[in-house]
Amino acid sequence: MRHGKKINHLGRTSSHRKAMLSNMACSLIEHKRINTTLAKAKALRKYVEPLITKSKTDSTHSRRVVFSYLQSKDATAELFREVAPKVSDRPGGYTRIIKMGPRLGDNAEMVMIELVDFNELYQKQTRTKKSRRRRGGGGKKAGDTPAVAEGTIETTTDETPAVDAPASEENKEA
């Protein structure tokens, strides 16, 4: 019976499993998304999310703890430099698992695991509010005319130049 056994061993020894999860976490941090199987993605999510939470506090101790899990200076530096500032206001749930369908060879369920804040398609668009114009009078009276600022020239022309105008009589004589 496997009562209370929460870790998925993934059919590997503990040293192989730790090395594999460390490599996958480094790839996820560097590339922001990777393709893998569903079981590995779920195990990776449990492995990498505490590291991202640890990276929110940029101290020597937290850098050493994260490095002990990742074993990569580049991935650790990128986690603290790029990923942590983007997820600083997020209370958890830094990864997203998207199912891609079965693998062709052995029908394993393939997924794409990605960092949530680095996908431009799913992010909410922050639009600047445009001022809305209303039709109402809003304080103008019937006799008021719009004021023109000093130094500006206001010209209005209703004429449009004719493209193919017939030749004038002056041009015919010459």
Image (spheres, rainbow, N blue to C red):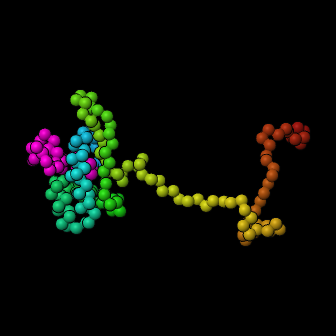
Q: Is residue 20 above or below residue 92?
A: above
- Quarter of image, res 155: bottom right
Q: Position of residue 131 (x, y in %)?
A: 61, 61
- Quarter of image, res 58: bottom left
- Left or right position of 30 against 139: left
Q: Is residue 156 above or below residue 2?
A: below
Is 136 covered by the magenta stretch? no
Please name whichever residue, 94 or 86, is drawn nearer the observer in this view of the structure.
94
Image quarter hosting the C terminus? top right
**Residue at the (26%, 66%) spot, across then down:** 57
Q: Is residue 38 above or below residue 59?
A: above
Residue numbers of the magenta segment:
1-30
Please name whichever residue, 72 or 165, is drawn nearer the observer in this view of the structure.
72
Q: Position of residue 150 (x, y in %)?
A: 73, 71
Is 4 covered by the magenta stretch? yes
Residue 110 in view in this figure: yes
**Residue at the (23%, 57%) spot, across then down:** 50
Q: Is residue 92 above or below residue 7?
A: below
- Left or right position of 122 against 106: right
Q: How many marks?
A: 0
Image quarter hosting the N terminus? top left
Residue 85 in view in this figure: no
**Residue at the (21%, 47%) spot, across then down:** 43
**Residue at the (68%, 60%) spot, across then down:** 134
Q: Position of residue 100 (x, y in %)?
A: 32, 37
